[in-house]
Amino acid sequence: MKNFKKVLVIVLAMAMMMSLFVGCGDKGKVDEPKNDNKKNEQNQEGKDEKEEAKGPKVLRLVGGKVNTLNPHNTTLGDNQSTAKRFCGTPIDIILNEAGDGYELFPNHCKEIPTVDETGKVWTFKLREGLKYDDGTPVNADAYVYSYKMLIDPNLKNVNSTVLTDNIPVVNGKKYFLGKCKWEEVGIKKVDDLTFTIELSNPISNADFITQFRNVVTAPVHKGMYEANMNEDRSETKYGIDMDKTPKCIAGPFKLAEWKQDMNRKYVKNPDSPLAEVYVPDEITERVIEDAETELRMFENGEIDRSAIRGAKVDKYRNDPRVKYGPAYTIFGFEINTESKENPILANKDFRKALFVGMDRESIGKGIFRTGTSVNYLVTKAYITDYETGEMYRNTAEGKSVEANHPAYDKKLAKELFDKAYAANKNKKIKLEISYYEENDRLKKTAEFLQENYENLFGKDKFEISLRSVPFQVQSENVKKGDYQTNFSFSYESIFNPWLWFVGYKTDAPDKSNSYKNAEFDKLLDRCLTGDLATKKKERREALAELENMLISDYSTQPVAGFELPSIYSDRIKIKTKDGMYIPGIGFALLQAGIED
């Protein structure tokens, strides 16, 4: 029986560490104020202070809007982070005792799942006593039902790929496509606290295990899920508001309050296996999407962490409370090659002209301030070998991708544009750039690109119009293919960079791009669930090939990678060694000390 390592420690290479990191110091006792009052007054004051010290430790944050807490459909960052607060998962990942890496933590599972000698059958043994907030047991039945619903052929859940593509569950894909019965799927209950997942072929232990810390793999509440199902079972309203959401699924916290577009509140679940690991007794989360307002709240002492954006980066650059993490997000520019409204977008010369004619440095450094110009898709935070901490961009394969694609070449851009212009019968080319109306930086980026391209190619030949669209509207437009361009922020599990490309498969659920390539699909399947899944060198070479294939289509154009700085209040005592950033858990905020 092969056992996955319970503890994995990754120390970041020095290249990932920022020279501005300054440790917050060891947790210390708060100095008591001096006073010369009488003894009985001193005793009373000391008593009051002790009582105050016993009060709840409250972590005060801000977040974005949340439209669903159904883990089967949570795709946006705030949706997933909110759901993860109260939805327990089979395993989790926490800061190790030394503070210099992470360790896998059996959460709902009483031990890290194990795999048999074939490498195909994984066994999950659950802890006893796990419950939903209404007392319903969280057991093998709950998990089997949840995974059945996740890949249900009628629901077509966007996160179904976890059990159909990321993990090659026996007949998982066939069931999702309606081509077999549930009884033929490799997910089985063994007893009340045990279930198994059988794979069609082995994949690496790390690829399998790390999927089950994702909130997508948390169990849903069967009674509530079914009660909110529509008549033809094609949709459930589970998780869309407070009344249709369980308040706790044996998670580390309970959802105490959720006022749409206003605020959220969580209180610690004392019965959670993570209760002794996580520090906050309460978490409050205000919905704030304006950067200036967020930072002002931080400066007023109302919240404990704020992102630092734009011009404010320079103001706080040398502040010891600021923490930097390596870029794990790629800011991209998507072009709809299937646009019926503007067929010139199908012209590859035109798309490449935009790619090599884009002044990425001005966008990354000028507009976003902490952005780095990139001509690749997988950032420096992604790791291809969890045992060594090998970063993909530092490998020969990763470096070869950067060498293959010119980042900024105005002469080449003009030559390519002229070819596209001739193909357009020498008629003026028009392009619409859409941006989210709530995001000032995207507005500035759109305005910059308009000026950048029109000046480069000539306003007599090229005209760009800008369109401000609400985020939700733009998301729906992209899904329907009713768009010309779209800005995107893409990231995935840093331990499995191959997953970054799943959304670009031809048959990806809820597809938000126009890329289609059968050769790409086949190679990605080989990396995720096929013959390359356990071959480190060949799989890494294939990763570079996938990246080259997608970039060379120029429908998905990398713009910048962001090393996003955040500032933490003095009451938050980061426990990572020397304030270092650690893949998978960042600065381990939920394990940080809170001192008032």
Image (cartoon, rainbow, N blue to C red):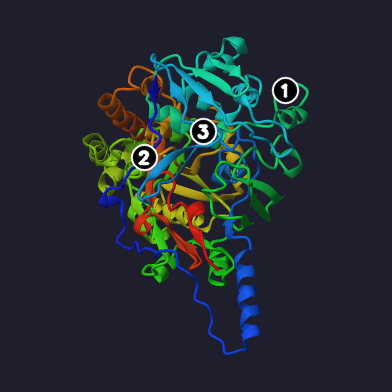
User: Which numbered circle lies on residue 377?
Assistant: 2
Residue 247 quadrant: top right
Q: Amino acid at mark 2?
A: Leu
Residue 27 quadrant: bottom left
Local secondary structure at mark 2: loop
User: Which numbered circle lies on residue 421?
Assistant: none
Residue 79, above or below 538: below
Residue 470 located left or right of residue 240: left
Residue 111 visible here: yes
Residue 215 quadrant: top right
Q: Give the residue at mark 3.
A: 339
Q: Earlier in the sequence, mark 2 or mark 1?
A: 1
Question: Dot 2, how many residues are within 10 Å of its Cα: few (below 14), some (14-19), or many (20+)?
Answer: many
Q: Amino acid at mark 1?
A: Arg
Q: Earlier in the sequence, mark 3 or mark 1?
A: 1
Q: Position of residue 69 (x, y in %)?
A: 64, 40
Q: Nearer the viewer, mark 3 or mark 1?
A: 1
**Residue contact at pointers 3 and 1, CB within 8 angstroms:** no
Question: Dot 1, how many residues are within 10 Å of its Cα: few (below 14), some (14-19), or many (20+)?
Answer: few
User: Which numbered circle lies on residue 233?
Assistant: 1
Q: Nearer the viewer, residue 385 or 519?
A: 385
Local secondary structure at mark 3: loop
Q: Nearer the viewer, residue 179 or 126?
A: 126
* Residue visible at 40% across and 49% down in the picture: 97
Q: Alpha carbon of mark 2 to alpha carbon of mark 3: how far?
A: 23 Å
Q: Nearer the viewer, mark 2 or mark 1?
A: 1
Q: Amino acid at mark 3?
A: Ser
Residue 222, above or below 453: above
Q: Position of residue 500 (x, y in %)?
A: 42, 34
Image quarter where the C terminus lies is: bottom right
* Residue visible at 57% across and 58% down in the picture: 61
Q: Earlier in the sequence, mark 2 or mark 3?
A: 3
